[in-house]
Amino acid sequence: MLLLLVSLSGFMVGCGGTEEELRSEEFTAKATELVESMVAGDFSTAVEGFDSAMKDVFPSEMLGDTWNSLISQVGVFQKQTGTHMEAIEGYDIVYVTCEFEYAMIDIKVVFNAENQVAGLFFVPSTGSTE
């Protein structure tokens, strides 16, 4: 019986990643979904994961205006080309690298300790992706 429990616990450990890897996957999925919502023009869905401060200063209408301004500057969205992540001062940051008609842009999505979007930035791509 003890051997069975030890075998099963070893199997369970081997099935999943580390907590850090799981958090990374979760944040990356949330960030890419946010970008997909913006590409689709669904800005009300895009802001659902924002923290209260972001919802106050960056409501869906403003996000739509910002996205449309970006499109007017860098051309039509083409595709997501990759992601990379870093942690800085208690924040988890996912960079979603996107190819637009005239430029590569990193959409920088900042997550707070409550796993909410606490910042959103559009910056020239650094070119490093996973």
Image (cartoon, helix red, strand yellow):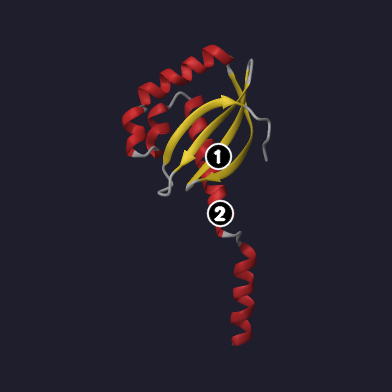
Residue 125 is situated, as x and y percent measured from the top left of the image, at 63, 27
Q: How would you rate the neighbour count of disc 2 (Cα within 10 Å): few for under 14, some for 14-19, many for 20 or more?
A: few
Under mark 1, the amino acid is Val
Left-right relation of 101 to 68: right
Q: Decide: is 71 above or below 12.
A: above
Q: How would you rate the neighbour count of disc 1 (Cα within 10 Å): few for under 14, some for 14-19, many for 20 or more?
A: many
Q: Decide: is 17 above or below 49.
A: below
Residue 80: quadrant of the picture: top right
Quadrant of the frame with the C terminus: top right
What residue is rendered at 53% in x and 52% in y? 23
Front position in the image: 44 or 56: 56
Q: Which residue is mark 2?
A: 22
Residue 63 is situated, as x and y percent measured from the top left of the image, at 41, 24
Left-right relation of 111 to 105: left
Residue 45: quadrant of the picture: top left
Under mark 2, the amino acid is Leu
Q: Which residue is mark 1?
A: 94
Residue 78 is situated, as x and y percent measured from the top left of the image, at 62, 22
